[in-house]
């Protein structure tokens, strides 16, 4: 089909993007009840959407809206769940959601990630790719996996750091992927313990803000370049670091179209900060059209870049930036590990369990070195009996003095212009001190 040929082009022109926007809006209206009802209420017909310039006519949507509508509303009608790939978001906006893709959409998502690798490094097969700090979820549950000429090694975040360092050293990776915080933590192990690190061709960071002190440490320890990326489970790669200027990013026109909106919900002028919304160009199974990311950024004037890219330019100014958790013995753990402890304690495998019925939003707060508070906006079916003892058991395994309290609240909306932080560590960690000392610059 012509529409499939367009949406699966790995490099798209602006004309291709406009055609993709027209087609996915028309598809969503015809085949996805959530969008048909949304646009009918707004008095909008897809025939009025000709391309990116018309996107501001459409309402912005959020994760919570999708969750409240339910899977029968936001998936393409007739989609066979047994044949779909599933990606679980990490819930940094407070609302975890499952993302569904068919086989072609999943393969394309993988393909654009390899296109991303090629933009910042000259790669040849065979490749050894090491993912640092993922959680065991979806199809990524095996530590070692071989796919054709590629070896994939996953250093899951629950592995001791010394063990991760040993595996990474012996793997001799071509590419290292990970969130800045987990890469920073592992780099400190190599440096503090005088372990000779491997020397990959490139380190790809994503999922969090990359600060200047982290980039410098990674470059110093691993003796290679660091390429920052703006990624999400809903889209895959949204933007990639310009190879010629680490202070800029290029939105990935193969995967999505990115907008920046002011406080009134209108397009923010180039050069001014706004909240970011994204339209997925290839996922017809579960469309994301003008989807609020919860992040903030600045769109710059488009021009032919010295790196060779001819298209949009942006800077990410507000994204995930979470402090480390400090245990009573002084040990510091990743905020993602603390999130896993709480999130996996919820009864997610119980038949008929639905997150939005149980918990609408939650936030993990460290108030002192032995106290974790979980703030919850409860759903109608909320019950502490289903999860609290499991969470306390897992928390005490980190340190026996750790305590857990639950606080039910009406709302967890962040301050205007700020990103919601799923894990809020209030203590002075090494991460926080080094960030302050580097003037909190990111690049």
Image (tube, helix red, strand yellow):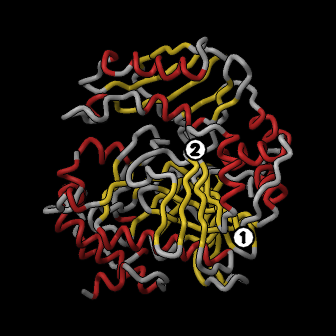
Write the residue at 29% across / 28% down.
358
Which percent across, then down, holds residue 242?
A: 68, 72
Which quadrant holds residue 366?
top right
Task: Choose the circle earlier in sequence order: 1 or 2.
Answer: 1
On screen, residue 97 above or below 403: below
Residue 356 location (% of width, % of height): 29, 35
Q: Is residue 169 visible?
A: yes
Image position of 331 with respect to 94: above or below: above
Q: CA distance from mark 1 to mark 2?
A: 37 Å
Mark 1 Cα shell of 10 Å, populated few (<14), some (14-19), many (≥20): some
Q: What number is the disc on residue 422?
A: none
Q: Which residue is mark 2?
A: 417
Quarter in which the N terminus is drawn: bottom left
Helix, strand or loop at disc 2?
Answer: loop
Quickly name the residue at label 1: 201
Quarter of the image for residue 54 reads bottom left
Residue placed at 20% from the left, 34% from the top? Answer: 351
Apparent side of residue 336 relative to residue 301 in the rendered image (left or right): left
Vertical position of residue 317 compared to residue 381: above or below: below
Query: Most extreme residue toward the front, as rendered?
Result: 170
* Front position in the image: 181 or 191: 191
Q: Residue furthest left?
A: 78
Q: Is 251 situated above or below 232?
A: below
Residue 233 or residue 356, whichever sits in front = 233
Q: Can you say which quadrant of the picture contains the C terminus?
A: bottom right
**Depth order, front residue of 152/359:** 152
Q: Which residue: 33% across, 79% down?
A: 50
Whether the residues at callouts 1 and 2 have beta carbons within 8 Å, the answer is no
């Amino acid at each position: 089909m012509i529409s499939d040929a367009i949406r699966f082009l790995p490099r798209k022109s602006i004309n291709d993007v406009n055609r993709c926007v027209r087609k996915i809006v028309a598809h969503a209206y015809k085949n996805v009840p959530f969008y048909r009802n949304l646009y009918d209420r707004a008095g909008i017909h897809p025939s009025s959407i000709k391309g990116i310039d018309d996107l501001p006519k459409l309402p912005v949507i959020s994760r919570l809206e999708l969750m409240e509508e339910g899977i029968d509303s936001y998936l393409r009608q007739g989609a066979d769940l047994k044949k779909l790939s599933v990606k679980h978001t990490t819930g940094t906006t407070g609302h975890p959601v499952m993302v569904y893709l068919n086989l072609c959409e999943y393969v394309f998502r993988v393909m654009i990630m390899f296109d991303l690798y090629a933009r910042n490094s000259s790669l040849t097969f065979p490749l050894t790719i090491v993912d640092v700090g993922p959680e065991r979820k979806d199809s990524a549950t095996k530590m070692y996996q071989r796919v054709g000429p590629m070896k994939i090694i996953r250093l899951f975040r629950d592995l001791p750091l010394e063990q991760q360092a040993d595996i990474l050293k012996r793997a001799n990776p071509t590419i290292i992927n990970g969130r800045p915080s987990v890469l920073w933590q592992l780099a400190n192990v190599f440096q503090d313990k005088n372990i000779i690190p491997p020397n990959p061709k490139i380190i790809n960071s994503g999922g969090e803000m990359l600060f200047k002190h982290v980039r410098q440490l990674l470059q110093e320890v691993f003796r290679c370049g660091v390429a920052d990326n703006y990624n999400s489970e809903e889209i895959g790669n949204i933007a990639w670091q310009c190879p010629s200027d680490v202070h800029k990013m290029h939105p990935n026109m193969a995967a999505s179209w990115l907008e920046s909106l002011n406080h009134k919900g209108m397009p923010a002028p180039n050069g001014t900060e706004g909240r970011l919304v994204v339209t997925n160009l290839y996922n017809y199974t579960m469309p994301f059209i003008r989807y609020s990311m919860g992040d903030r950024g600045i769109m710059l004037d488009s021009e032919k870049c010295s790196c060779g890219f001819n298209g949009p330019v942006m800077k990410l100014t507000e994204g995930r930036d979470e402090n480390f958790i400090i245990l009573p013995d002084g040990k510091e753990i990743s905020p993602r590990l603390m999130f896993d402890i709480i999130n996996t304690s919820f009864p997610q495998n119980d038949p008929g369990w639905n997150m939005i019925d149980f918990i609408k939003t939650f936030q993990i707060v460290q108030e002192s070195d032995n106290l974790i508070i979980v703030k919850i906006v409860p759903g109608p079916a909320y019950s502490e009996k289903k999860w609290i003892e499991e969470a306390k058991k897992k928390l005490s395994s980190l340190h026996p003095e750790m305590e857990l309290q639950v606080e039910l609240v009406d709302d967890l909306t962040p301050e205007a212009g700020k990103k919601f932080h799923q894990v809020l560590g209030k203590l002075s960690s090494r991460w926080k001190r080094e960030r302050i000392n580097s003037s909190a610059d990111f690049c």
